[in-house]
Amino acid sequence: MIAAFNSSNRSLAVGLAAAALALGVAGSAMAQRDPAYAAARSAGQVGEKTDGYLGFPSSPDSSLRALVEDLNIKRRAVYSEKAQAAGATVEEYAFTSGCRLIAQTAPGEKYEGPSGGWLTRSSAPPQRDARCP
């Protein structure tokens, strides 16, 4: 787990959040092109995690697991590149991206709450980690 941000890391997190915005648009568009992913997300079989990766609120079948693992590999590659350019760790960048991706969930979608349990997004803003920018 990533350590709590101190004040100097907070500034970094804010900068990373802006950079993560571009990632989210590209990553979300890439994932949404696959109808299996879109259906699984709508059905609550896939959700956003606080660490910036996709996870499973319930046990997936092998094809869904393979699809999500592929998307997570692609996310990690982008996070690694963006983190290096920003002078941050992959974990810091992924966490900041996770904060933003959770904020962008739609009502009815699953996401990992601050306590680690899976929650379903309502019309209210999602519960996010206190360290989120």
Image (cartoon, rainbow, N blue to C red):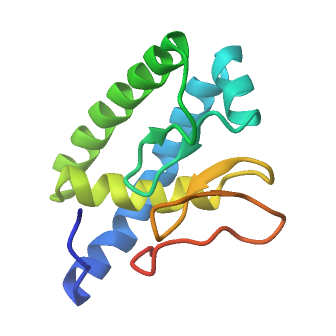
In the current view of this chain or complex, which residue is farthest to the top?
63
- The residue lying at 30 percent from left, 80 percent from top is 10
Q: Quadrant of residue 31?
A: top right
The spot of residue 129 in percent (x, y) is: 46, 74
Q: Is residue 74 above or below residue 42?
A: above
Q: Is residue 10 above or below residue 111?
A: below
19 or 33, nearer to the observer: 33
Q: Is residue 73 above or below residue 6?
A: above
Q: Is residue 129 left or right of residue 36?
A: left
In the current view of this chain or complex, which residue is farthest to the bottom?
7
- The residue lying at 64 percent from left, 33 percent from top is 45
Q: Is residue 88 left or right of residue 116?
A: left
- The residue lying at 79 percent from left, 49 percent from top is 108
Q: Is residue 124 left or right of residue 111?
A: right
Quadrant of the rendering where the N terminus is positioned: bottom left
Q: Quadrant of residue 35?
A: top right
